Amino acid sequence: MKNRYALGLQQVQQELITLQNPGFYWITSQRQEDARILLRQVVSHQQAATLVSSDEKPQSLLTPDPLSGPARIPLFSLPASKASLQQLESDFARVLNSRSGLVLFYSNAALWSKLSEDELTLWVKRMRRMLIKKQITLLMITSGASIIHLRNHLQRYFRQLDGVAHLEFQQDSWQYRINWWYAADKLLADRAIRLSCNENQFSAANEVEQTIPLSLNDENQFLAQQGVLEGAPPLSSQWQLFSDNEGVFSRAQQANAATVIFNLAHNQDINTLAKMVHSLRRSRGNALKIVVREISTSLRYSDERLLLACGVNAIVPTAATLSRFLTTLEGIQGQQFTRHVPANLAALMQALQPLQQKGYLPLENFCAAVQQLMSNTLLPENDKGLMVALRPVPQLKPEQILTLCKPRRFGDLVTLINDRIYLFLSSCRFNDLDIALKSIFSLPHDELFSNRVVWFEDNQILSEVHKIRQLTPVAQREAPMPTMDAPQDNPAAASHTRGAQTPQPIILDLDGDRR
């Protein structure tokens, strides 16, 4: 009988939490705190375990103490370097044996970016051979903002890895997504389990399933605000038009699978519209098709993400013609909304809206704000914003440039480091960078700067933030916004400075003589 281990997830199918021996499994998570909770939960369900960490001290990973588990756990630290990672297989072969129990290796996603694709493939194959030879089960737990790159690479190792899964935070719950899992002579693949976390223990959530209504007799109905048809009458008897969005919302509360179309004419209506969409999606299910059409306004990128997260199927831009709008409606017929919509709307809106800061920040505050935004798992990976380093032309000082820099949006931050200005533009795409710079600076930016460097991936931005923080002296990190020194006049000329001029009356007679 082969030894088997368990992940310890509560109320989850046994085959999905069993680890065979020998075995090689890999679980990823974007949030470090989720990975730590999972690690402690796994340890608490073992009789023997060994912990290796390359991200931080292994003792800190077991704090607070697991609820149960082995009385003694061998702890090892691995330097976060490429050479140490490549030597890990030989280190395991020398130190571990079948009595080591379940071996857990906790690491940061940034560590694996130091290996090329070929080097990672070789590493996985060598580790697999060693585990089989030594009869050891290894569970890899990796977290970090750049986890998506590693997850994509792991898909190709079906023959080397016995299981690959991902733990994703979704505001009010977690999704445990299993790519494949081999244990107990059974192979299970493409599974998704919703988890809750109580007292630092993950368990299957008791959620009310959103089932398809038995009656879909309204699936061909269109409930729309009358402005979306640009003054045209109802296109058929299946169309019902309402004078405002409140009327559409009220009628949609009795719909099951109809197409619900809201009109967005002003950006200040975003929050109200988000509440309507969220309420309909949570109460009426996934068969309802919700569309927002922009009228005379264009949504900001962050507002688009908010509406999509609340349950919108499609957003039709203001530039789309009526015929293109109707084509979009045809395209979503028969769709089922598959994304999870958190129950707490206030928390969702707070997480998706930009930082409530703008303008100049001291370096320390600037770095902290950027890191806070980068750690937000509800924002799309590698699409949270842009970081730009700008070097002024030789004729201008950085302090002069700052007087021309006027960020208007919350989430647009600026700081000064030596002779360069750093900007962070929240929810800004790369192709919109020139438009954003034109809005921020009161003079053409091409005339102000000699060059610029742009970072747009999460790991690139985090790496640069860490770099500039380390290279800047502590005394300069809290420095306030610098100001230009007042020009010093020549003392000799200062005595002859003219005072304020006083108007003098002049009286002219008819002959033009001045008195």
Image (tube, rainbow, N blue to C red):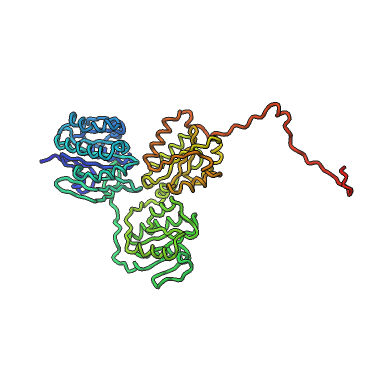
Q: Residue at x 28, y 34 (%)?
A: 65
Residue 329 figure quarter: bottom left
**Residue closest to the far top:** 492
Quarter occupied by the N terminus = top left
Q: Residue furthest left?
A: 1
The one of 387 and 366 positioned closer to us in this rendering:
387
Residue drawn at point x = 45 percent, y = 34 percent: 364
Percent x, y for residue 513? Answer: 88, 45
- Position of the C terminus, as image quadrant, is top right
Residue at the right extreme, as displayed: 511
Question: Could you tell me which residue is drawn at 43 percent across and 48 percent down?
Answer: 431
Q: Residue furthest bottom?
A: 237
Relative to residue 498, is residue 333 depicted above or below?
below
Q: Where residue 31 appears, x then y in whole percent?
A: 33, 41
Asked whether residue 121 is in view, the answer is yes
Estimate the x, y position of residue 220 in percent, counting from the top left: 35, 68
**Residue 44 visible at all:** no
Camera-side residue of 3 and 123: 123
Residue 373, compared with residue 309, is above or below; it is above
Where is residue 468 drawn, in percent x and y? 43, 33
Front residue of 491 and 99: 491
Tally the numbered discs.
0
Residue at 64% over, 29% down: 488
Q: Nearer the viewer, residue 404 or 93?
A: 404
